[in-house]
Image: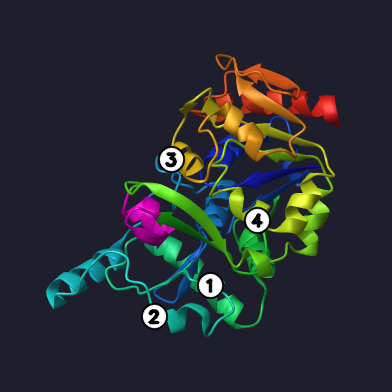
């Protein structure tokens, strides 16, 4: 049995070829929910859905977001209506009162659907409508995720990191904004001053997640701040990682990051944007997988390989390195 911690695109890309090394039927994926937003009344769980769609064979692997070949008629019409009515586009936060009132899923991440700032495909939207409706019927996010996983015929067990809402809030030189505004709308342009995981003090990992963390854990090459940070902000989650074998794959090659805003976010929260900084952020990691060109010296065992992942063959190569690293600490 093995458990992957997933966020962004790094870990899903690793999962793209990991079934050659790790049996999906004995694999659990715990997905970050700090990136979740409620958009136009529907709960969107980007990191959960990337794993869901990948496991279901429908992920758009050109963007690593949404469903391949999806249409966008509803999104197009939302923007046409906003333009015709003279309504401002971009992220439109609901009022402060609305951010914490109503559904349990709200936690400073609620946006109007007017001229939605995230492009949601039509089939993709059906997933969000189903998810939100099942939550409204009284199901937990874990129960809903497993229902959707059955619909997509996932072999691995997919779990949200918590049933409680947590929001990744980025403090920048241009103000405070949800991570999705910072990344999707602003394309990581404002300078990061800090990152807050709002709601994490009150959130708890589920029993299912804690059971999964008792198995060896793989932290894929995801963003240490906004993909793993919301999980690590829950004390019980972080403590569990200190008591189980953990291997981490660095998303950096020394000080060069493969993709995304990891460097800016790590610098913003006080970590060196480098492999050494990742090691500082992951004191619970027992061993690391680094790129063959990464000469960083760490105080823990290291397995080196070519860590660039551009397809399933690359993913399988890195997964074999992960397996080798786990054998040293399990």
Whichever of callouts 4 and 3 sits on the residue coming sooner in the sequence is 4
Secondary structure of the residue carrying tag 2 is: loop
Whichever of callouts 2 and 3 sits on the residue coming sooner in the sequence is 2
Question: As displayed, is residue 118 above or below residue 310?
Answer: below
Q: Are marks 4 and 3 in contact (CB under 8 Å)?
A: no
Tell me, yes or no, if residue 68 can be seen here: no
Mark 2–mark 3 distance (CA, rounded to whole Å): 29 Å
Whichever of callouts 1 and 4 sits on the residue coming sooner in the sequence is 1
Secondary structure of the residue carrying tag 1 is: loop
Mark 1–mark 4 distance (CA, rounded to whole Å): 15 Å
Q: Are marks 2 and 4 in contact (CB under 8 Å)?
A: no
Q: Position of residue 89 (x, y in %)?
A: 23, 67
For residue 107, the mark is 1
User: Can you say which quadrant of the picture contains the C terminus?
Assistant: top right
Secondary structure of the residue carrying tag 3 is: helix
Q: Position of residue 273 (x, y in %)?
A: 50, 33
Mark 2–mark 4 distance (CA, rounded to whole Å): 26 Å
Tally the marks: 4
Q: Which is nearer the eye, 212 or 311?
A: 212
Q: Position of residue 250 (x, y in %)?
A: 60, 30
For label 2, count other residues whose C-alpha is less than 10 Å away and answer few (under 14), some (14-19) or many (20+): few
Mark 4–mark 3 distance (CA, rounded to whole Å): 19 Å
Question: As displayed, is residue 56 above or below residue 249?
Answer: below
Report which residue position mark 4 lands on.
233
Whichever of callouts 1 and 3 sits on the residue coming sooner in the sequence is 1
Q: Position of residue 79 (x, y in %)?
A: 23, 67
Nearer the camera: disc 1 or disc 4: 4
* Residue stretch rendered in magenta on the structure: 172-186
Residue for point 42% across, 57% down: 180
Q: Are marks 1 and 2 in contact (CB under 8 Å)?
A: no
Report which residue position mark 2 lands on.
95
Q: Quadrant of residue 159?
A: bottom right
């Amino acid at each position: 049995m093995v458990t992957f911690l997933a966020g962004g695109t790094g870990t899903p890309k690793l999962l793209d070829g990991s079934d050659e090394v790790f049996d999906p039927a004995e694999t659990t994926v715990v997905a970050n929910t700090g990136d979740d937003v409620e958009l136009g009344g529907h709960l969107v769980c980007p990191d959960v859905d990337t794993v869901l769609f990948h496991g279901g064979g429908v992920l758009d692997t050109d963007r690593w977001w949404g469903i391949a070949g999806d249409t966008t008629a509803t999104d197009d019409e939302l923007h046409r209506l906003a333009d015709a009515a003279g309504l401002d586009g971009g992220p439109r936060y609901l009022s402060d009162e609305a951010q914490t009132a109503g559904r349990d899923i709200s936690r400073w991440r609620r946006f109007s659907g007017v001229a939605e700032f995230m492009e949601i495909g039509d089939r993709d939207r059906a997933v969000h409508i189903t998810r939100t409706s099942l939550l409204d019927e009284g199901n937990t996010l874990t129960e809903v995720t497993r229902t959707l996983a059955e619909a997509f015929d996932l072999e691995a067990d997919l779990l949200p990191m918590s049933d409680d809402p947590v929001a990744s809030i980025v403090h920048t030189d241009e103000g405070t904004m949800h991570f999705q505004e910072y990344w999707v709308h602003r394309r990581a342009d404002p300078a990061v001053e800090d990152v807050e995981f709002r709601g994490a003090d009150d959130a708890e990992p589920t029993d299912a997640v804690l059971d999964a963390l008792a198995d060896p854990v793989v932290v894929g090459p995801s963003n240490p701040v906004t993909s793993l940070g919301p999980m690590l902000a829950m004390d019980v989650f972080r403590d569990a990682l200190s008591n189980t074998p953990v291997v981490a794959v660095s998303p950096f090659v020394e000080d060069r990051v493969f993709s995304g805003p990891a460097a800016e976010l790590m610098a913003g929260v006080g970590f060196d944007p480098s492999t050494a900084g990742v090691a500082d952020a992951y004191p619970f990691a027992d061993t690391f997988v680094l790129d063959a060109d990464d000469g960083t010296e760490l105080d823990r065992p290291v397995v080196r390989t070519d860590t660039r992942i551009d397809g399933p063959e690359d993913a399988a190569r890195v997964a074999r390195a992960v397996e080798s690293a786990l054998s040293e600490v399990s």
